[in-house]
């Protein structure tokens, strides 16, 4: 709640005001740069800017609110002004670019021993999470390189361990112990963040690792567009493309489709039997959100059903793992992964610096 914190409220309203031009630029391009698009952009600037000024002058005008509510308000203003998905073209181009290098990345991962592979997977997620149009620092990076250039540099520049919040050793020990004792997580729910390198080169390889261990994987993506966050609809198409490059992903999607059709809903965790499918299912569902944060009091039917029997939750990105749910305690093992792309947030959260990494593994 920042309605009662003048310093935090003033800072974040200022940040969001500065982002209005960049957001408007993307929105303008999404409608072809027409005169009508220009008029809609002006309407968005006025509408969202007015809300921010109202909150600054009268903090209680909308009742109790946090940063997640303001971020969702921005998306609602865009939709109200006729921008259904301001970052659509940008997301499509980034997904296409990332898919081109996915086969080489998967081959590299497959050549590693288990311990090294687990570290590389987590590093890949953290590096991929730099692609966030909600961060001014990231917007500046986009001006100086392509998606692949930025991703490669992010991998090279990733801060060395121990990270600012670092539970990797505990996570690796748990996974190695699973291998030794022939155990597995039964079902993992993965809440993903951005399009492009983030999802393709970060989260899909992590999901693939879990699938190969026999874990049912449920990837939950946004119901509606928000910044460059991937939506569930987009992810289904993207995963299908990735499946043409990876049998594990393709097999997981096919198993999930078969089970969904059989039960006419997302089923409970399936027991392992001699007649079980060759590939663990990979479900892709909506998370019930229309903004970049994650409010778990508001979820869809499939996500509610998926939670039954889940024993691992993965929260990725600043919006889902830090701005919301950072201190939330779950009833199963939880992995919270993010690169912090805001200096003030890093300082406030753990006396850290911009681009510090969070790898928080909480066991029950």
Image (tube, rainbow, N blue to C red):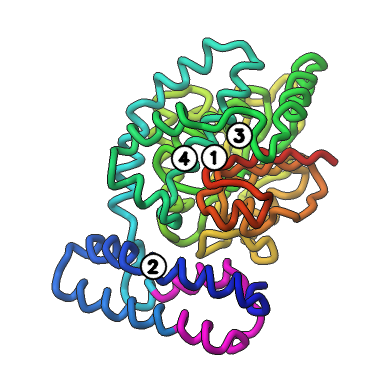
Q: Is residue 84 magenta?
A: no
- Of labels 2 and 4, earlier in sequence is 2
Residue contact between numbered discs 2 and 1, judged by CB atoms under 8 Å: no
Foreground residue among 88 and 259: 88
Q: Secondary structure at mark 1?
A: helix
Percent x, y of residue 181: 82, 16
Q: Quadrant location of residue 25?
A: bottom left
Above-or-below relation of 156 to 260: above
Give the labeled residue for mark 1.
Answer: 257
Residue 198 tag number:
4
**Which one is in front in this view, the residue at disc 2 or the one at disc 4?**
2
Q: CA distance from mark 3 to mark 1?
A: 8 Å
User: Which residue occupies 33% across, 77% down?
Assistant: 45
Q: Residues within 10 Å of mark 4 (few under 14, many from 20)?
A: many
**Residue sitting at the far left:** 35
Please provide the residue range marked out in magenta.
51-77
Q: Quadrant location of residue 58?
A: bottom right
Task: State which quarter of the image contains the C terminus.
Answer: top right
Q: CA distance from mark 2 to mark 1?
A: 44 Å
Task: State which quarter of the image contains the N terminus.
Answer: bottom right
Q: CA distance from mark 1 to mark 4?
A: 25 Å
User: Which residue occupies 69% across, 22% down?
Assistant: 275
Q: Residues within 10 Å of mark 2 (few under 14, many from 20)?
A: few
């Amino acid at each position: 709640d920042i309605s009662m914190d003048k310093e935090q409220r003033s800072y974040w309203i200022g940040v969001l005001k500065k982002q209005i031009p960049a957001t408007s630029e993307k929105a303008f391009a999404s409608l072809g740069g027409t005169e009508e698009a220009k008029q809609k952009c002006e309407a968005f600037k006025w509408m969202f800017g007015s809300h921010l000024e109202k909150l600054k002058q009268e903090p209680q005008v909308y009742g109790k609110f946090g940063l997640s509510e303001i971020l969702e308000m921005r998306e609602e203003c865009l939709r109200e002004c006729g921008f259904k998905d301001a970052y659509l073209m940008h997301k499509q181009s980034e997904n296409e670019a990332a898919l081109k290098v996915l086969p080489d990345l998967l081959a590299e991962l497959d050549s590693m021993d288990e311990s090294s592979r687990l570290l590389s997977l987590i590093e890949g997620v953290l590096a991929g999470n730099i692609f966030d149009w909600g961060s001014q620092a990231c917007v500046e990076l986009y001006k100086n390189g392509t998606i692949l250039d930025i991703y490669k540099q992010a991998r090279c520049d990733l801060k060395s361990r121990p990270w600012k919040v670092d539970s990797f050793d505990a996570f690796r020990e748990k996974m190695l112990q699973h291998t030794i004792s022939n155990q597995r997580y039964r079902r993992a729910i993965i809440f993903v963040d951005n399009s492009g390198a983030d999802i393709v080169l970060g989260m899909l390889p992590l999901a693939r690792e879990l699938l190969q261990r026999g874990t049912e994987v449920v990837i939950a993506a946004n119901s509606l567009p928000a910044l460059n966050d991937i939506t569930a609809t987009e992810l289904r198409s993207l995963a299908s493309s990735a499946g043409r490059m990876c049998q594990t992903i393709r097999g997981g999607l096919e198993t999930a489709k078969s089970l969904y059709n059989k039960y006419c809903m997302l089923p409970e965790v399936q027991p392992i039997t001699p007649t079980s499918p060759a590939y663990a299912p990979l479900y892709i569902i909506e998370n019930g959100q229309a903004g970049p944060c994650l409010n778990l009091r508001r979820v869809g039917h499939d996500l509610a059903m998926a939670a039954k029997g889940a024993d691992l939750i993965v929260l990725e990105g600043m919006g889902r793992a830090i701005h919301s749910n950072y201190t939330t305690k779950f009833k199963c093992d939880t992995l919270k992964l993010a690169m912090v792309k805001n200096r003030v947030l890093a300082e406030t959260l753990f006396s850290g610096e911009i681009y510090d990494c969070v790898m928080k593994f909480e066991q029950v």
